[in-house]
Amino acid sequence: MENYSECYHCSLNHPTFSNGVVKPETYDIQPQGKCLRHTTECQNLADMTYDIRSGFDHHDQYSSWFLWPMFSFQVYPGNILNTYHWRALDADHVIVWRGWYSAGGRENEVVRKLAVQDRETTVEEDIHLVESVQRGLNSRGYRPGPLVIDPNCGVNSEHPIMHLQRWMRDAIEMA
Ligand SMILES: [Fe+2]
């Protein structure tokens, strides 16, 4: 969830997402209650890797809402809706289900191809990253470090991690 909730790793780790979908310098993440709202402008819509007219309408921006504790929906340009549903099995294991939606629930080849592209690029890149981070967390040398907080909530700011960790502490204290 921390990985999903910040985008400072996007430019280095997600070339397809950063060059073909979003414009990282406009990426903005804002807390709203126990939700993290992501919005950004997109790169040149003519260079998108899919036809943006294949979604629910022609809305040309990217947005996402992460809903504490383990769900998000993400809207690709063209209002192509997809969801992440995380389920923690224990401290070291998680299952992630993705859902992809099409107008009228009809088979849509563009959406199916985009789902495969997303799995093979952004999701695959994140799996390598988060598994590496998890190994690091288990090392004897690990110590939590400071978070980088940009008051303007720019793409390199880790303020969403601060909110996630606060919400987690609150949940543990209430348990
Ligand atoms: Fe990522």
Image: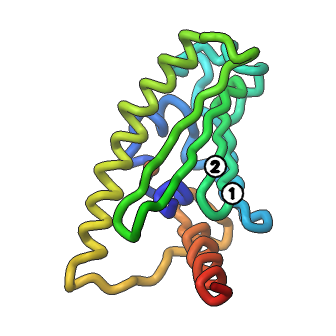
Image side of residue 93 versus residue 97, left or right = left
Residue drawn at point x = 55 percent, y = 70 percent: 161
Which image quarter: residue 130? bottom left
User: Which of 118/15 is in front?
Assistant: 118
Q: Which residue is drawn at 67% across and 19% down?
A: 102
Q: Mark 1 points at which residue?
A: 67
Residue located 34% across and 44% down the image: 125
- Observer able to see residue 7: no
The quadrant the C terminus occupies is bottom right
From the viewer's perspective, tell me whether residue 62 is left or right of residue 131: right
Give coordinates of residue 159: x percent, y percent.
Answer: 60, 71
Q: What residue type is labelled 2?
A: Ser
Q: Which residue sits at x=69%, y=50%?
A: 65
Specify few, some or many for label 2: CA neighbours under 10 Å numbering under 14, 14-19, or 20 or more: many
> Taking 57 as reference, is 167 above or below it?
below
Please tell me whether mark 2 sits on a helix, a strand or a loop.
Answer: strand
Specify the farthest residue to the left.
Answer: 140
91 shown above or below 112: below
Judge whether 122 appears above or below 37 on screen.
above
Residue 137 drawn above or below residue 94: below
Which quadrant of the structure image shows residue 132?
bottom left
